[in-house]
């Protein structure tokens, strides 16, 4: 895995941990699925 991808994932997971008090993880997953669907569409 490239270092830029690892950096992105580290920042992304830090952000998810920061916000999971306000946004449940299953809601974050829904948003990511919707984003992926839009990329495919």
Image (spheres, rainbow, N blue to C red):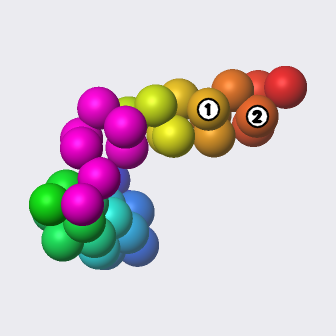
For label 1, the crowd category at 10 Å Cα-Cα, with few meaning under 14, some 14 to 19 and many 20 or more, is few
Pointer 2 residue: 38
Whether residue 10 is visible: no
Q: Residue at x 24, y 41 (%)?
A: 25
Question: Secondary structure beneath disc 1?
Answer: helix
Q: Is residue 20 magenta?
A: no
| Quarter occupied by the C terminus | top right
**Residue 34 got which mark?**
1
Whether residue 8 is visible: yes
For label 2, the crowd category at 10 Å Cα-Cα, with few meaning under 14, some 14 to 19 and many 20 or more, is few
User: Please, is residue 13 above or below residue 14 in the view?
Assistant: above
Q: Residue at x 14, y 60 (%)?
A: 21
User: Please, is residue 2 above or below residue 18 in the view?
Assistant: above
How far apart marks 1 and 2 lie (CA) works out to 6 Å
Q: Residue at x 76, y 34 (%)?
A: 38
Q: Is residue 28 left or right of residue 41?
A: left
- Kindly check if marks 1 and 2 are in contact, taking CB atoms under 8 A apart as contact: yes
Q: Quadrant of residue 12?
A: bottom left
Q: Quadrant of residue 35?
A: top right
Question: Secondary structure beneath disc 2?
Answer: helix
User: Please, is residue 34 above or below residue 24 in the view?
Assistant: above
- Residue range in magenta is 22-28
Q: Residue at x 46, y 31 (%)?
A: 30
Q: Nearer the viewer, residue 9 or 32?
A: 32
């Amino acid at each position: 895995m490239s270092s830029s991808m690892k950096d992105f994932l580290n920042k992304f997971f830090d952000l998810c941990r920061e916000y999971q008090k306000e946004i449940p993880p299953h809601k974050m997953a829904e948003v990511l699925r919707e984003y992926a669907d839009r990329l495919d569409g």
